[in-house]
Amino acid sequence: MKKILVSECLYGGKIVRYDGGDTTETDPRFLKWKEEGRLIPVCPEVFGGLPTPRPDSQRVGDKVMAQTGEDVTKEYTLGAEEALRLAKEHQVVFAIMKQDSPSCGSKFVYDGTFTDTKKEGQGLAVEYLRNAGFTVFAEEDLDEAEKLLLKLEAEA
């Protein structure tokens, strides 16, 4: 069975988001994959040692800065490395990651001004995954993810 890496906030069951909120994905395809045991949940920020809840953080160039002014690049890097390790260990075929996150954003991230302004870009964990050759989708790209999964399973 082909495995899929997913942001733990989408997977659900644990509160891991910076604001303590819930963004559990409820799309029937996602829930089917979860029930089948395909999904490997990861939260790079928690893996990096950050608490829940935690201050909002955003990518600023090569760094990740918390709204408090604290440089949390080290924690985000540790989390990105662990997410990549798990992707390799479980031989995932792709990832579905939470959009806009400084770890998991795959198309857009917040611009570092803490003014709710987004820019094109990717989170640190997504950067690590893509640099290692993994395809990464956002949660709104489940149609494309499903097509790729069906193609890969037909080839197996």
Image (tube, helix red, strand yellow):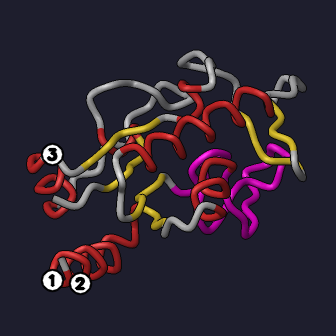
Image quarter in which the N terminus is found: bottom left
Which kind of residue does numbered mark 2 sit on?
Lys
Q: CA distance from mark 1 to mark 3?
A: 19 Å
Front residue of this view, candidates 149 and 105: 149
Is the C-beta separation of discs 1 and 3 under 8 Å? no
Is the C-beta separation of discs 1 and 2 under 8 Å? yes
- Identity of the residue drawn at 40% across and 61% down: 139
Which kind of residue does numbered mark 3 sit on?
Gly
Front residue of this view, candidates 132 and 116: 132
Q: Main secondary structure of the magenta part?
A: loop
Can you tell which quarter of the image residue 21 is in?
Answer: top left
In terms of secondary structure, where does tag 3 sit?
loop
Q: Residues within 10 Å of mark 1 (few under 14, many from 20)?
A: few
Q: CA distance from mark 1 to mark 2?
A: 5 Å
Which numbered mark, 1 or 3, is in the foreground of this view?
1
Residue 113: image location, x then y, percent: 86, 47
Query: Which comes sooner in the sequence, label 2 or label 3?
Result: 3
User: Start and end of the magenta stretch?
Assistant: 99-123
Q: Which residue is mark 1?
A: 154
- Identity of the residue drawn at 81% across and 30% down: 67
Q: Which residue is mark 2?
A: 151
Q: Quick check: is 120 in the magenta stretch?
A: yes
Q: Which residue is mark 3?
A: 37
On screen, residue 74 above or below 137:
above
